[in-house]
Image (tube, helix red, strand yellow):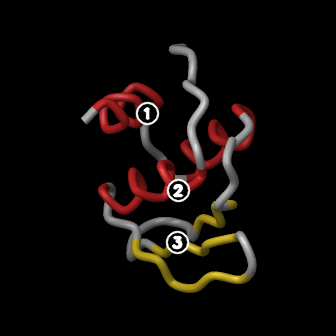
């Protein structure tokens, strides 16, 4: 399994938006993303996302880690 880079919450949100998620609402520093076919995601808008949290979000979005990294490099 490839290593996950250290990224910000905003960068992760941008990638999930590319995957078809939409921002539903924000409360404090947490942003709720919705997708018509998948479970909703709650992403903290922090300077650094922990690797465990990032991996959990990718798993809940039902995408391979490789695809997430590929979208990150675009």
Spot occupied by residue 45 in the image (x, y as percentages of width and height):
64, 61
Which one is earlier in the sequence, the residue at label 2 or at label 3? 2
Q: Secondary structure at mark 1?
A: loop
Q: Are the two marked residues, 2 and 3, in contact with CB atoms closer than 8 angstroms?
A: no
CA distance for labels 2 and 3 = 12 Å
Q: Which residue is mark 2?
A: 10
3 vs 55: above or below = above
Is residue 25 left or right of 14 when viewed as pictured? right
Q: Secondary structure at mark 3?
A: strand
Which one is earlier in the sequence, the residue at label 3 or at label 1? 3
Which of pointers 2 and 1 indicates the residue nearer the eye? 2
Residue density around tag 2, few if under 14, some if 14–19, many if 20 or more, within 10 Å? some
Is residue 13 left or right of 36 when viewed as pictured? right
Q: Residue at x 60, y 74 (%)?
A: 32
Which one is earlier in the sequence, the residue at label 2 or at label 1? 2
Q: Quadrant of residue 70?
A: top left
Q: Secondary structure at mark 2?
A: helix
Which of pointers 3 and 1 indicates the residue nearer the eye? 3
Name the foreground residue: 39 vs 11. Answer: 11
Q: Which residue is mark 1?
A: 64
Label for residue 48? none
Q: Residue at x 37, y 36 (%)?
A: 72
Spot occupied by residue 29 in the image (x, y as percentages of width and height):
71, 70
CA distance for labels 2 and 1 = 20 Å
Q: Which residue is mark 3?
A: 33
């Amino acid at each position: 399994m490839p290593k996950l880079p250290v990224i910000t919450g905003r960068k992760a949100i941008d990638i999930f938006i590319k995957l078809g998620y939409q921002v539903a609402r924000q409360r404090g520093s947490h942003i709720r993303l919705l997708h018509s076919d998948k479970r909703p995601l709650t992403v903290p808008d922090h300077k650094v996302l922990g690797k465990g949290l990032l991996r959990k979000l990718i798993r809940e979005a039902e995408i391979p880690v490789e695809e997430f990294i590929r979208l990150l490099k675009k």
